[in-house]
Image: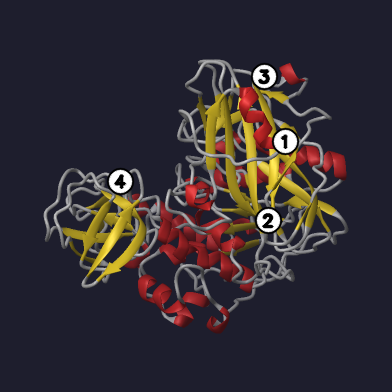
């Protein structure tokens, strides 16, 4: 049974109630080239029916287990520890919902996913490894147990754990007896023991400024840190972490909770930069916008994967292991830990309607009766003559261009809710487009006032350079208009008289030294698909507006940090 669908009704928005994080309203409209009315009336791409904007409410709630942490993701690779007989300990920052929660449980995964475009999305983590975990709240670490034990062995086939799935989908911890205040900063402290040369599933990047840490060393020396003591970065660590895939907790809140299904543009790990100072560390526009206090903070979980396409959902194992922990919770408690599904897919594959229909049908088979919300998708521009510095220099291929490219037709079908496939649709893709006409819909916005030159020679090695203009945190600087790969993300900006000292995040590609007077500019993307962190901040406003439109129903919790 699918839930009853509401009748279509256009919805406008009052801009006085808007305050996107990291960018003010004037800048949003200036950057996207939209008028106030155009930005918030959510117009159509075609003459089909308007996007639905009525609340889609789930069943009434009493005490329920619901998603209760930002940032957590499905592992997307296998990794190793360099030292024989070593262990790894990772401390990962996150945020709790805008209401008190208690007795949290975490899911420690035993498989991983791949972004490969063929074959199974979900993959076997062939080696067994031991996992322990502690949740840090207000400076106190609470050790978890797994069926009464402090360690659980994960990885390998499902049958090795008496599961009926091909691979080990993981294990839920026992409830951790702790009460967590609303809007708390959390730290997920996970420890892995594994033999030399063996591999374990991992994901995400580190951000030391918000308390992320890693330590590699002797297992006996590291395990006491799960109970207390300072975790300092030490040892030879891979550039990834092992962390829970989900956290749920008990709550009486009747506010909506959202399961995000999507690809790399919703998975996005560049928000976890070395210069990040956001303690809740939400990832990508979708989670950023839903976790923002704009419109009310909404708790989320995420089963998306980089490279995912609607066609992959039909390949088994496709969603089998990602959704199995959620189905297990439903078996135990009689309910799912979320009230709505939000699907961001549409950047990979052929983008034809039958494939999307099959994908949605499969997701609904796992979660029948859950309101299903779909968004349109931002531009994709594979070619650029000037590294995406200008609109004119962006050259979308025919497949991606409006009005007749497959991407345009796909977006039109989504917004028209073809075949009444969804319970609601929203034109979130518009927030990443340069404007309303076909030319601008096919392109990313241009940051034409965020460009200038180097004011001093730069050796291309130092993470510090000096510019004649002021970029913003999360902007992507391009160093060479003839080469889009030469660039890096802005971590910090300090005014120095008539120039600006800019600290670049680790991982920039300079291409060599650049003399004073060399042209520099902020660009929305480095590859034509994946947005800069700044663009994710801009596009996050779309999901704030979804909340303000009442698309998920009433949001009543106070989404303000504790005093």
- State the residue in front, 299 or 124: 299
| Sequence-wise first label, 4 or 1 | 1
Q: Residues within 10 Å of mark 1 (few under 14, many from 20)?
A: some
Alpha-carbon span between mark 2 and mark 1 = 23 Å
Residue at 53%, 39% in the rendered image: 232
Q: Nearer the viewer, mark 2 or mark 1?
A: 2
| Residue at image mark 4 | 508
Label 4 SS: loop
Quick check: marks 4 and 3 in contact, CB under 8 Å?
Answer: no
> Which residue is outermost to the front?
229
Residue 349 screen position, x and y as percent? 45, 42
**Residue 169 seen:** no
Q: Which mark is residue 96?
A: 2
Give the image quarter of residue 86: top right
| Residue at image mark 1 | 324
Quick check: marks 2 and 1 in contact, CB under 8 Å?
Answer: no
Figure check: 219 above or below 416: above
Residue 461 screen position, x and y as percent? 23, 44
Figure check: 335 above or below 40: above
Q: Which mark is residue 157?
A: 3
| Sequence-wise first label, 1 or 3 | 3
Quick check: marks 2 and 3 in contact, CB under 8 Å?
Answer: no
């Amino acid at each position: 049974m699918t839930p009853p669908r509401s009748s279509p009704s256009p919805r406008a928005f009052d801009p006085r109630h808007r305050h996107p994080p990291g960018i003010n309203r004037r800048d949003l409209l200036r950057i996207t080239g939209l008028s106030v009315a155009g930005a918030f009336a959510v117009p159509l791409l075609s003459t089909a029916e308007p996007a639905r904007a009525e609340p889609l409410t789930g069943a009434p709630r009493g005490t329920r287990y619901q998603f209760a942490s930002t940032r957590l993701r499905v592992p997307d690779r296998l990794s190793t520890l360099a030292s024989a007989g070593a262990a790894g300990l990772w401390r990962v920052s996150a945020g709790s919902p805008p209401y008190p929660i208690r007795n949290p449980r975490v899911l420690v995964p035993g498989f991983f996913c791949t972004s490969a475009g063929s074959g199974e999305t979900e993959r076997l983590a062939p080696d067994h490894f031991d996992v322990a975990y502690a949740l840090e709240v207000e400076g106190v670490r609470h050790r978890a147990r797994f069926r009464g034990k402090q360690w659980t062995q994960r990885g390998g086939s499902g049958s090795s754990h008496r599961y009926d799935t091909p691979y080990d989908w993981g294990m839920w911890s026992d409830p951790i007896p702790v009460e967590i205040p609303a809007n708390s900063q959390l730290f997920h402290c996970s420890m892995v023991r594994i033999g030399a040369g063996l591999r374990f599933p991992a994901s995400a990047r580190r951000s030391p400024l918000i308390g992320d840490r890693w330590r590699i060393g002797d297992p006996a020396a590291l395990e006491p840190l799960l109970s207390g003591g300072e975790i300092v970065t030490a040892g030879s660590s891979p550039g990834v972490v092992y962390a829970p895939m989900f956290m749920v907790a008990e709550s009486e809140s009747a506010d909506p909770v959202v399961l995000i299904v999507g690809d790399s543009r919703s998975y996005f790990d560049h928000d976890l930069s070395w210069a990040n100072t956001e303690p809740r560390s939400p990832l990508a526009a979708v989670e950023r916008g839903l976790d923002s206090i704009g419109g009310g903070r909404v708790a989320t979980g995420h089963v998306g994967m980089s490279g995912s396409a609607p066609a992959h959902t039909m390949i088994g194992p496709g969603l089998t292991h990602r959704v199995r922990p959620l189905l297990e919770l439903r078996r135990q408690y009689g309910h799912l830990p979320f009230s709505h599904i939000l699907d961001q897919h549409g950047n990979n594959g052929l983008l034809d309607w039958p494939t999307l229909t099959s994908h949605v049908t499969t997701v609904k088979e796992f979660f029948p009766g859950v309101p299903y919300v779909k968004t349109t998708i931002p531009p994709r521009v594979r070619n650029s003559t000037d590294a995406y510095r200008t609109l004119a220099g962006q050259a979308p291929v025919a497949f991606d261009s409006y009005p007749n490219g497959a991407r345009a037709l796909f977006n039109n079908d989504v917004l028209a809710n073809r075949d009444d496939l969804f319970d609601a649709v929203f034109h979130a893709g518009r927030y990443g487009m340069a404007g309303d006409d076909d030319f601008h819909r096919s392109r990313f916005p241009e940051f034409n006032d965020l460009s200038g030159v180097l004011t001093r020679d730069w050796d291309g090695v130092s993470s510090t350079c000096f510019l004649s203009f002021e970029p913003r945190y999360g902007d992507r600087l391009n160093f060479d208009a003839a080469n889009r790969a030469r660039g890096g993300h802005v971590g910090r900006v300090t005014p120095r008289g008539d120039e600006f000292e800019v600290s670049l995040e680790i991982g920039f590609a300079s291409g060599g030294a650049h003399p004073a007077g060399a042209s520099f500019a902020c660009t929305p993307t480095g590859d034509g698909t994946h947005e800069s962190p700044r663009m994710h901040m801009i596009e996050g406003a779309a999901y704030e507006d979804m909340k303000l439109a009442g698309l998920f129903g009433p949001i009543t919790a106070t989404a303000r940090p504790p005093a």
